[in-house]
Amino acid sequence: MPGEVTREEAVLAYRMMLGREPESEEVIAHAISAAPDVATLGRHFAASPEFGRRHGINQHAAPRFDAPPPEIETEATPEELARLTEHLARYWTRMGVDAPHWSVVTQERFRPENIGANLAEFYEGGAWDGAVLDATLARIGRRAEEFAHAVDYGCGVGRITVHLARRFAVVTGLDISAPHLELAAAAVKEGGHANVMLQRVTAADLMPVPRCDLWFSRIVLQHDPPPIAFEVLRRTFASLAPRGVAVFQIPTWCEGYRFRIAEYLAWRPGAEMELHVVPQRAVLELAHRSGLILREIREDNYITGEPGRVVSNTFVFEKI
């Protein structure tokens, strides 16, 4: 087809924009399939975290500073929360059966047909999250050794949990999907981590740990409808011990995004992986009411592809 990206053009994009060779024919094919033309291919590469690390932030891709406030309902009745959670659990339970590793890191090499050859790489990738957590705590004057009990919220198949187990005396991994937790249990057992507990999140208890010292969550809350994410944060903030710390990532703005509970429940929720937003103001106000102080907030690059349309923040709060 006219304008279709060729293999040569995809390889040149890697060389010219990322300064390296593509690692496999698979990533070349993915680059070609994801871009209908060369201009789009270039935008995808320019928006990637790797390009940003190499060349710096593309200021032209920054979200609008004159953006209107989002129309988002964050409060729900217990009945509405139960229905929302039911849809969420149904989707992630299905993904735990169909494509558990890919549902955690959506890359082709982690699909069921490819995971056998890439399983070690998948779990090794969680070491980066551990290193980032170490650096984050250091920036606020804390160390992992100060926290006895850490929670990995949305632990999935235990990719990050096994690395947290090397840093904290007790780690609890929480997830809404039983199939994911079964694989997490296997990973924990294989790693010999006797200090890890795994527990399922339910509609009746969205945060089933009554007390913890550190709460960590990344690329998890972004999949929760806003009332669920907001209720999880409410319960988490209440569960933090004095001087406890919460480190989590969540999108706080997306161009054109709105959330109305009635509209959402009338739609077909739970049919596919969803991206949701909780306004930054709502997170900050909830933390203030809960007796937390903001130690750090950063715009992160965890939502890739269209950095001008989505703002994702990593928050660090401490319980006073």
Image (spheres, rainbow, N blue to C red):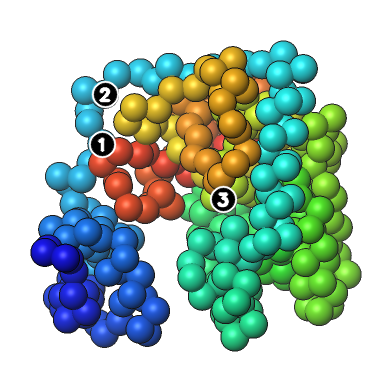
Does residue 165 show up? no
What residue is drawn where x is 75% and y is 45%?
176
The type of residue carrying mark 1 is Pro
Q: CA distance from mark 2 to mark 1?
A: 8 Å
Q: Is residue 150 left or right of residue 320?
A: right
What residue is drawn where x is 42% and y is 41%?
312
Coordinates of residue 115 in the picture (x, y in percent): 61, 77
Tag 3 residue? 218
What residue is drawn where x is 32% and y is 31%?
255
Q: Looking at this view, is 149 or 145 the one in front? A: 149
Whether residues under marks 2 and 1 lie with C-beta atoms below 8 angstroms apart, the answer is yes
Residue 23 to residue 141: above or below: below
Coordinates of residue 169 in the picture (x, y in percent): 81, 62
* Mark 1, other Cα within 10 Å: few <14 / some 14–19 / many ≥20: some
Quarter of the picture containing the N terminus is bottom left
The type of residue carrying mark 2 is Ala
Tag 2 residue? 67
Q: Which mark is residue 63?
A: 1
Q: CA distance from mark 3 to mark 1?
A: 21 Å
Earlier along the polypeptide chain: callout 3 or callout 2? 2
Among the 4 quarters of the image, the one containing residue 168 = bottom right
> Could you tell me which secondary element the residue under label 1 belongs to?
loop
Q: Looking at this view, is 297 or 84 the one in front? A: 84
What residue is drawn where x is 77% and y is 17%?
79
Coordinates of residue 95 in the picture (x, y in percent): 67, 55
Q: Residue furthest front?
A: 1
Among the 4 quarters of the image, the one containing residue 47 = bottom left
